[in-house]
Image (cartoon, rainbow, N blue to C red):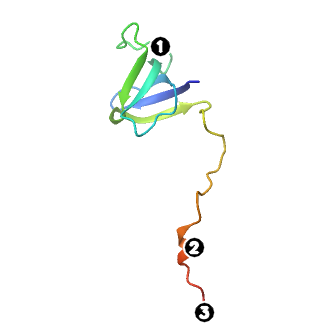
Amino acid sequence: MSVAAIVHLLGEDAVLGDLDEVPDPRHNYVMLRNLRKKDGKQLSYVADGATAFLYAWNRISFIELMGEIPGTVRNEVAKPAATSVLGFFREDDR
């Protein structure tokens, strides 16, 4: 299932594309498919027959994910993974 995303590029207009999955920040690039302008029109600099586009993270300002995101639950509150370390260093009143 693909996720629609608006990718804001440094010094350029934002583009709309489809992500196969939520981008991993550890990767060097983000892969988009079905690249187009935000209004849905074709981009003039995209070659005919191109199907996937790789953008380096250093060219991206931020990404807006549209709609449901696979692997996440809406309104889920993050739960702490373990007991707080601060609780172990409390001094009792004497």
- Mark 2 is surrounded, within 10 Å at the Cα level, by few (under 14), some (14 to 19) or many (20 or more) other residues, namely few
Q: Are marks 3 and 2 in contact (CB under 8 Å)?
A: no
Corner quadrant of residue 71: top right
User: Which numbered tag is attached to residue 41?
Assistant: 1
User: Which numbered tag is attached to residue 94?
Assistant: 3
Q: Amino acid at mark 1?
A: Lys
Q: Amino acid at mark 3?
A: Arg
Relative to residue 89, is residue 48 depicted above or below? above
- Real-space CA distance between mark 3 and mark 2, rounded to the nearest whole angstrom: 17 Å
Relative to residue 61, is residue 89 depicted above or below? below
Residue bearing the label numbered 2: 87
Taking 25 as reference, is 73 left or right?
right
State which tag comes first along the sequence, 3 or 2. 2
Mark toward the viewer: 1 or 2 = 2
The image shows residue 25 at horizontal and vertical percentages of 42, 39
| Quadrant in which the C terminus is drawn | bottom right
- Find numbered disc 2 in the image and state the secondary structure of the residue it sits on: helix
User: Which numbered tag is attached to residue 52?
Assistant: none
Q: Are marks 3 and 1 in contact (CB under 8 Å)?
A: no
| Quadrant in which the N terminus is drawn | top right
- Real-space CA distance between mark 3 and mark 1, rounded to the nearest whole angstrom: 73 Å
Relative to residue 35, is residue 64 depicted above or below? below
Relative to residue 75, is residue 68 depicted above or below? above
- Find numbered disc 1 in the image and state the secondary structure of the residue it sits on: loop
Taking 75 as reference, is 91 left or right?
left
Mark toward the viewer: 3 or 1 = 3
- Find numbered disc 3 in the image and state the secondary structure of the residue it sits on: loop
| Residue in the image at 66% along x and 44% along y | 75
